[in-house]
Image (cartoon, rainbow, N blue to C red):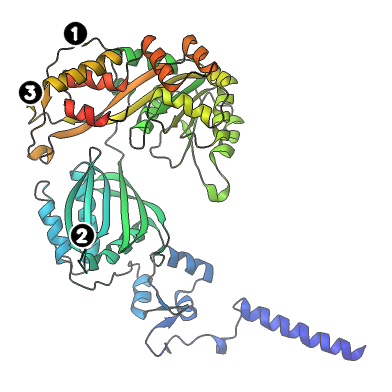
Amino acid sequence: MARTKRKTTKKSTKRVATSKVQKGRVSQSEKPDLAASASDGLLTMEQTIERLKTTRATFYRWLRAGKIKGLKVGRQWRFRPEDVERFLHGEGPRVDLPVGPDSLVQGLNVAGKVHEVVVGKTPEDPIVQSVNGLILLALRSSASDIHIQPMREPGDDNGVGSVRLRIDGVLHPSFDFDIRLLPAVVQRFKQMAGCDPSTKRVPQDGRCMMKVEGEPVDLRLNFAPAMYGESITGRLLRRQALAFSLADMPFADRDMQTIREAIASPYGVIIVAGPTGSGKTTTLYNCLKELNEPARKIITIEDPVEYTFPGMVQMQLNAREGLTFESAMRSAMRADPDVIMMGEIRTPDSMQQCMQAALTGHLVFTSLHTNSAAATLTRMIDIGADPFLISESVRLIVGQRLIRRLCPHCSKPTTPSTEQLEQAKAMAHSGGVDWNTLSREFRQSVGCAKCSQTGYRGRTALVEMMVLSEPIGSALRRGASEHELHTIAVGCGMTTMSADGVRRAATGETSLDEVFRGTANL
């Protein structure tokens, strides 16, 4: 028994010693010698953590966020002493450049001539200055998105980094730069977005808030691995660019009356439908701001929250922590709301919850990715909704998409061809608009310096509003097709998006070519 006891004591002592080493409880003589770096002049992770006086978990968080720069040597991390010292002094990591930044800076200067963007070379860090200049160029160009990607023509062994800007819904090439600078540009954007610069084989998403010329800007970034490097997509949200007001929405008088009557109802579902980038969130926010007053409790469920409003409870989804549309909706229903906005219907469960909330006395706003109002009804049935519940709960469907406005400085009057007039007349007639009542003051695009030679400046929304009337509800319950539902809605007074486009072209707000382009698949 005594021998067994002594053996157990030795094992337990060994375990205690091992646990102390694992927890980092080492004596002074066992601590790493900071002066003795590796043979290549780099510090190990243990040496770096000791130098920074932090924990391993915190250090990993800094490393993933790109706040400190490291090198992967095999499976081990190594760190340059100068990078560690720079971090201690509050400086960001430097980006190594394989070539000079001349092609990037020159491209920005050439592209920025129209918009007066001046980007100079900075000895400290030219990549930081160039990225800032690129964001400034996009904002002054009124671009909604920045696209940067590696491109290589057949037979070209080098390739280029291509920069394009999405202006008024259309991508415009801006300039190309030396592809060897692309990793440095990607790393800088990742540092800004709080993404892991060392991860290059899987997509990443991030965001950052900044001020550009005194204006707050929200930059949403996506990084995706491509054939010849990583591509970057940046969505720019200008918080001062939109002054939300339902009265300023480009709706016809009849449509404005329809939507105001719908949001004045104490309960029901209002759905805004359209493809990606059709302004659905803007319409939802305008409706919510119209209702936002102390007498109402408004809860929004969004992914992500794009704009914040005082007086509303806005919930940001977090799928990793279990906060999904469904769980957030269940929580919102227990919070005594008057109005609920679910950013998007994605699953049958979220759709059922919206309809159930409406049937229990709540006004619910949401969106769905469909091409038209009639297609929204058939899509809801396809994903499991009962036609009877749809007809009882849904009050209004707003179908919309965006088209470009003509530049007011350079557009000129025009006489459309016979074929164009016949097509426009047919679209107006089938969409509920009397062709004979239109003024028909058609104009065409030209192009000038103020619109970057595109002929268009800004966008407007084409809309159709389907009120779930009794004829539509009856047709829905007996299994009517999308085309039949569309026809019944027009007979009940709905103006289609195509007809709305013809009406706007007839007043000179846009061109017939733009209307035909924007409504081609309707």
Q: Is residue 432 above or below residue 409?
A: above
Asked if residue 308 lies left or right of residue 416, the reply is: right
Residue pictured at 45% horizontal, 41% vertical: 303
Mark 1 to mark 2 CA distance (whole Å): 55 Å
Helix, strand or loop at label 1? It is: helix
Spatial separation of the CA atoms under disc 3 and disc 2: 43 Å
Q: Are marks 3 and 2 in contact (CB under 8 Å)?
A: no
| 114 up-or-down from 451: above or below | below
Q: Nearer the viewer, mark 1 or mark 2?
A: 1
Which residue is the site of mark 3?
414
On the image, the x and y values in percent for residue 259 come to 39, 17
Question: Residue tagged by mark 1?
Answer: 436
Residue 508 in view of the camera: no
Badge 1 density bin: few <14, some 14–19, many ≥20, Cα 10 Å: few
Q: Position of residue 208 (x, y in %)?
A: 36, 51
- The amino acid marked with disc number 1 is Asn
* Image quarter (top left, top right, bottom left or bottom right) of the N terminus: bottom right
Pointer 3 or 2: first along the chain: 2
Residue at 47% across, 78% down: 75
Q: Residues within 10 Å of mark 2 (few under 14, many from 20)?
A: many
Query: Which mark is first along the chain, 2 or 1?
Result: 2
- Please, what secondary structure does the residue beneath circle 3 have? loop
Q: Which residue is mark 2?
A: 130
